[in-house]
C-alpha cells in the first residue's frame, strides 16, 4: 500500500487538486486497493471553528472540466502524526516543505519531496493559482507530477 499526502498552504487549491487527480489516475489504472491518498494544509487559514473550507470554486471547476469530483473535501491542517502515517509527503512549493519539516519535526526518513521532482522538474514549484489566477497552469503542473509519480509507484 502506497500512502500519499499532498500538502500546500491552505488545502483549498493545489493539494486537493493533486489528491483528486491522483485518485482519478489510480482508479483508471485499476490500482485503488494499492493506494491511500489525502491532502492537507500547512496553515490553519482555511479552517474556522474546527471546520475546513471546501475546495476553492475555480479549483473545483478545473477538476470538473476533466470529470473529476472533489465533493465533500474540506481543508485540514497536516500534523506531526502524518509523518508516520504516510510514505510520501509531497509539497507543492519550497515554503510548504519548510513548514512541513517544522510541523513534522524534521524529515529523518527522507519522505518529503516536491511534486514536480517526480517528473524531472527537480526543485520546481507547482504554480499557485491563488496568486496567479491561472488554474490551467496549475492543472498542467499537478497532472504532470501525478502521472510521473504513478509511473514510478506502479
Image: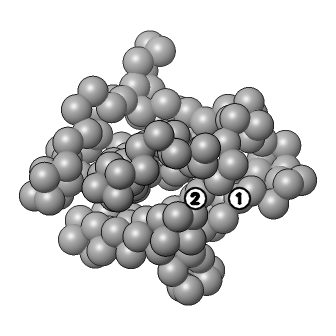
Residue 20 percent coordinates (x, y): 33, 48
SS class, disc 2: strand
Left or right placement of residue 77 versus residue 66 in this view? right
Residue 115 percent coordinates (x, y): 53, 67
Left or right placement of residue 99 versus residue 55 in this view? right
SS class, disc 1: strand
Above or below 31: residue 84: above
Q: How is the image coloured?
A: one colour
**Quadrant in the picture for residue 97:** bottom right
Residue 149 percent coordinates (x, y): 51, 67
Question: Looking at the image, do the residues carrying marks 1 and 2 touch, with CB atoms under 8 Å apart?
Answer: yes
Q: Residue at x 38, y 75 (%)?
A: 144
Give the residue pinned by disc 1. 112
Q: Residue at x 23, y 65 (%)?
A: 135
Left or right placement of residue 10 versus residue 53 in this view? right
Q: Residue at x 74, y 56 (%)?
A: 111
Q: Which mark is residue 91?
A: 2
Amino acid at each position: 500500500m502506497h500512502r500519499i499526502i499532498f500538502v500546500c498552504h491552505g488545502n483549498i487549491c493545489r493539494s486537493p487538486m493533486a489528491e483528486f487527480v491522483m485518485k482519478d489516475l489510480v482508479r483508471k489504472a485499476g490500482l485503488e486497493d494499492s493506494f491511500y491518498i489525502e491532502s492537507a494544509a500547512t496553515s490553519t487559514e482555511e479552517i474556522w471553528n474546527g471546520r475546513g473550507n471546501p475546495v476553492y470554486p475555480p479549483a473545483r471547476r478545473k477538476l470538473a472540466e476533466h470529470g473529476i469530483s472533489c465533493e465533500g473535501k474540506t481543508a485540514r491542517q497536516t500534523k506531526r502524526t502524518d509523518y508516520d502515517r504516510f510514505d510520501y509527503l509531497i509539497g507543492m512549493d519550497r515554503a510548504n516543505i519548510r513548514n512541513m519539516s517544522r510541523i513534522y519535526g524534521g524529515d529523518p526518513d527522507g519522505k518529503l519531496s516536491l511534486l514536480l521532482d517526480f517528473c524531472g522538474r527537480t526543485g520546481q514549484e507547482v504554480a499557485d493559482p491563488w496568486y496567479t489566477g491561472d488554474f490551467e497552469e496549475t492543472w498542467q503542473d499537478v497532472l504532470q507530477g501525478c502521472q510521473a509519480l504513478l509511473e514510478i509507484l506502479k
